[in-house]
Image (cartoon, rainbow, N blue to C red):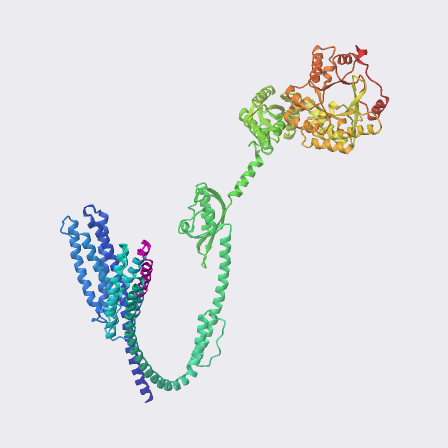
Amino acid sequence: MIACFVALMSAGAGYWQLADSRAKLQAVEWIHDANRLADVAQQASASLAMERGITAAILANPGAAQASMLTEMGRARAAADVFHAQLSAVTDDLARRDGAHPLFSKAQEMRLGQTRMEALRAEVDLRLSGDARGLDAEHWIEVITQQIAGLHDLAAISMQPLRDNRYALGSALVIKDLLFTLSEYAGRERAAIGVVIGRNLPMSAQQWRVMQDQRAVANQARRRAESILAHLPDSPALAQARQRFESDYLGRYETLREQIVASSLASQSYPVDAEQWYRQATVGVNSILGLSSALSSQFEADIARLRSHAITTQGMLILLFFAMAVLLGVAFLAVRHRVLDPLRALESAAATIAGGDLTQALPAQREDELGRLGLAFEAMRQTLLADQRQRERDTEALRKLNALIEQSASAMIVTDVNGMIEYVNTPFTAITGYTLDETLGRKAGFWRSGRTSAAMYRQMWEAILAGKVWEGEMINRRKNSELYWASMTLSPVRDDSSRITHFISVQSDISERRRIEERLSFLSAYDELTGLPNRSRFAERFAGASAEAEHKGTMIGFVAIGIGGFKRINDSLGRDAGDQLLKVIAQRLSECVDENDTVSRHGGTEFVVMSPEVVLRDALLDKVTRIIETLNLPVVIQGERLQPVINAGISLLPNDGAQLDVLLRKATIALHHAERRGLGACLCTDALDQEAQERLALEGALRDSLDAGGLELHYQPKVDLTTGRIVGVEALARWIHPATREQVPPSRFIPIAEESSLIQHLGAWALRQACRQNKAWLDAGLPRMVVAVNLSANQLRQPNLVDTVAEILRETGLAPSLLELELTESALMEDPEQANDVLRRLKALGLRLSIDDFGTGYSSLAYLSRFPVDQLKIDRSFIMQIAADAAAEAISTSVIALAHQMGLRVIAEGVETEAQLAFLIRHGCDEIQGYYYSPPVPAPALAVLLASAKKLVPSRSVVR
């Protein structure tokens, strides 16, 4: 019984709910279709506007219409027809819900308008065919504009509610919003016109534009509101409000506004003052607000009826559901324990799992169907948890692998078994220039350069198809056509059945490494500056040439070539100039040798030519002579015309040895001999080899003696021919060989010191010893005199020469005026500008400067006049020929006269006879030095000579 009662109540409630839901559904469907109709009406309006514009443009000048414009007109017509068809379909759908709605009378008008459109288009076509009876542009625009306005009205009417459906109140908020907009813009206009009247000035252009914009918005809102009001149910209050709106706003307000605007445009006095305008305009604005208030009252009455009905329905539902709740509560409590609680537990577990939390275990279940379901659910949770954890581990591993692949410096490519690319990483794009979109789906290898052999590609495919890993290096081409070297590793990928499914290629750009290797390979065999073979490559070619010479019984010539004066060029013009000279010499040398000859640079300024198949020694000498003549041709570098000085030394295989180092050493010995003697070319002989060995041994002994203090200075007096007294001494190095205990003459060991750079050590030692000794003589009370020390050309080129001299003077305490430095004429003329700079800096120290061996060189008088020297020394070679050679006498007298004209003193060295002395006194020489008075003596002996104060020469009156 209770069940039947409950069933009946449930059926009644269900029926009521169904009816109510149906009303709601109808309202929703109506609103949905009405919105759809509004959208289609808007699209139809837009398409008609397009047809209106293009057709009007054509009708304005039919004869000039282009084919493209006619085509566009056809497309616009077709689009308008499509949207009108859609509009008819939507209207039909709405008709099935409420056929008496005002919407459908408007829709019928639109259908008639569409029918008229076809007639209008026919008239347009008639006009386009040249018939003047057709429709013109102005009439066409007017008719289509009316049709578009009808579409706008149709959209507005669609917002009216369904009859007898309390859920379809769609227009209340729309019309209130429109009336609010109208009142707001009317209020703005009231304020703006009030300001103009108050100022009693015509409206400005800006004010007129603003008022026009505001008036357009207000008119649009008014028209839409009137369209909706026309279809609302009328009431006495609403009718009265509409009457006031039409009389106060549309009548008096609009009339007064037009009068004010006309007065402003005509610059006439306004018909009212600001206060009168405000009062009358306020009446018009208030009529809008009154209309809105009347609408609100009517809508509120409708809503009150709906609310009352809803309250009644709610009360009935509460009573019905309360009774049902009481009856169902008992059943629910009985079912809850047996069914709901277990299901709730399963539901909670399912929600937890759905949220991603698989860690919460299900509580124990009882032994029934729900209990077994719970056990199965728990087993599923554990399986899902294990699977989740495995996926997390796999995802992390994949993330790390992906990061490793993307951050790798190598390009990685994955292809299928046919070589179609399925994946490339970011470095692939960086290396090749091809983007991901340009690469995926293409056949691997499209970056080939054509420089890799087909055989290598065959080997690669054979290896990977056999399941092996292939490694190699190829030349590929980037997207920009640039070639590059790639180191590649290709590996096959197998599935669970060991079937190859993919290939993985790892490529690295090794272009820079290959360039370095090629550069190192070149540098290991060739000279970087000249491009000629170096010692290593020269030795390789010698091995082959020597074997062939032994087989044929011929000789091989080795020509060592040196460039004289190269250091002067480097110092004066810079290293770049020196490098350019070496390149020119290398090019000339390569061009003037035979095809089978090998030209090599062995460092510095030394080149070596290996000439195989030499039959006659004289023929080789002639060849070397021609080479020297070619290399001695002038060279212009940096605008300077340079004259190379080339010498050559020659050795022969097998005459001078069979080992390369021996042959090169002997050729170098011959070269040095040619350089010392100015021979040009010189063949190595046993005597030259022996001399070289002796010079080398002598150099070693000299070096040891310098380190051990085994040298000493002797001093030769310089005598003033006016007073006959000693005014200075020249310090001269003397060396006793440590092994033979024999004295080695300076003419023997000084050249060796100059060639081996020992001269710098020797010169510094001699300067320090001489200054120290002169200071000792002064401290001993002996007469003041100048000590002279020779400077070599090597010392003159030392950058720190001036600093070294200054340091020695400070160290020994000798006054600079008591030190004289003697420099040979040839040393000064190697680089006159540089020499002049050094001499001036030395002179600034306060010491004396003298030119030694004057007359033996080729110095320019212009340079001589610029050198800051104090004295000229006539070379002993001229003094020894006095009285026997008229030329020597003439040179000596000329030097004396020239020096005196330049304000310089003159000293003659090597004076040994009375006749030589008499000649020098007779021609006004200032000082003499030589064996006639005293040979060079050790320091103690000279101290005795100084202490005796003995005059060593007769007076000039005696000579006369």
* Nearer-the-camera pick, 63 or 744: 63
- Determine if the magenta segment contains residue 342: no
* Nearer-the-camera pick, 685 or 483: 483
Whether residue 789 is situated above or below residue 49 in the rendered picture: above
Query: Where's residue 361, x and y in %?
Result: 49, 74
User: What residue is drawn where x is 31% and y is 85%?
Assistant: 9
User: What residue is drawn where x is 31% and y is 58%?
Assistant: 211
Query: Where's residue 642, x and y in %?
Result: 58, 24
Q: Is residue 168 visible?
A: no
Whether residue 913 is situated above or below residue 368 in the rendered picture: above
Instruction: Classify residue 887 as left or right of residue 74.
Output: right
* Nearer-the-camera pick, 401 or 814: 814
Instruction: Classify residue 799 as left or right of residue 947.
Output: left
- Number of numbered discs: 0
Q: Which quadrant of the figure has residue 682?
A: top right
User: What residue is drawn where x is 83% and y is 18%?
Assistant: 951
Query: Where's residue 407, x and y in %?
Result: 51, 53
Whether residue 334 is situated above or below residue 44 in the rendered picture: below
- Work out which quarter of the rendered image holds the C terminus and state it: top right
What's drawn in magenta, residue-wise?
182-208
